[in-house]
Amino acid sequence: MSQRLSGKVAIVTGAASGVGEAVARRFACEGAHVIMSDLNETDGSRIAQEIGATFVRHDVTDPEGWRHVVDTTVEAFGRLDILVNNAGVLLKGDIEEASYEDWKRLLTVNADSVFLGCKTAIAVMKKQGGAIVNMSSIAALAAKEDYVAYSASKGAVAALTRAVAADCRLKRYRIRCNSIHPDGILTPMTRGGYPDGVDPELLTIDKDPMNRACRPSDVADAVLYLASDEARAVNGIELRIDSGQFVMSI
């Protein structure tokens, strides 16, 4: 590996599986000190031990939990350079089917947590600069009528990202904030959404370039770029990782 994050200190939320795990593994290979946060202590601790990272049990919807994770990071490493707000949930439902309870849960986990993460991290990052990468979705940009509350939550993430990027630039904090918009990523969270009898593995772009399903490692590559110094001039963008799904829908 090229050690593109050598010496950097990074927090990755939702890091015990899926995209978060892939990001944590990639960051560790690239030389970062990785703090993995998740509610899943069993898998999170195991993966952290495998890659030489630090695991912290963390409820991303709790302000005190955010302060604990950031304080733990600064106490251990003296700084925080990268935050990846990846934790999230996926619930299906159109405007008639979706319950108010589902709406509140999705906004709390997917959007409130990103607000809390950005707010808490910036208080530390503004001393030396840094990079924030927020996990949104193609659902924030294109119509996903059967995921109405999920789409709204990810739309909030996209708008918040732009506002944070503009605010930090105006204040000269040297903090970049960008969002990533995947679609069809094969993770434990999304596999249940495929029709019965359909093997998601056969829909991946490495099996058929015309299909849109990507692997967590494809998203991790994009996160790595935005977190690295190679993207020092990239701020406030919405990076789609969707195999062209968005452009095919317009």
Image: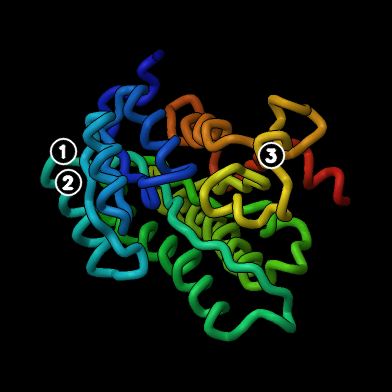
The N terminus sits in image quarter: top left
State yes or no: discs 1 and 2 in contact (Cβ < 8 Å).
yes
Indicate which disc, 1 or 3, sits on the residue closer to the N terminus: 1
Disc 2 designates what residue?
Answer: 74
Residue at 67 percent of width and 41 percent of height: 200
Residue 87, image x, y percentages: 43, 55
* Dot 3 alpha-carbon crowd within 10 angstroms: few under 14, some 14 to 19, many 20 or more: many
Question: Does the rendering let one see residue 233?
Answer: no
Disc 1 designates what residue?
Answer: 77
Choose between 28 and 43: the one closer to the eye: 43
Viewer-nearest of labels 1 and 3? Answer: 3
The three-letter amino acid code for the residue at tag 3 is: Ala
User: On the image, which quarter does residue 66 sit in?
Assistant: bottom left
Establish if 171 lies above or below 231. Answer: below
Spatial CA distance of label 1 from label 2 is: 5 Å
State yes or no: discs 3 and 2 in contact (Cβ < 8 Å).
no
Residue 61, image x, y percentages: 36, 69
Establish if 50 lies above or below 120. Answer: above
Establish if 182 lies above or below 115. Answer: above
Question: Does the rendering let one see residue 146?
Answer: yes
Labels in figure, total: 3
Residue 185, image x, y percentages: 61, 43
Secondary structure beneath dot 3 equals loop
Disc 3 designates what residue?
Answer: 213
Residue at 50 percent of width and 36 percent of height: 223
| 213 with respect to 22 (left or right) | right
The three-letter amino acid code for the residue at tag 1 is: Phe
Viewer-nearest of labels 3 and 2? Answer: 3
User: On the image, which quarter does residue 93 sit in?
Assistant: bottom right
| 219 with respect to 123 (left or right) | right
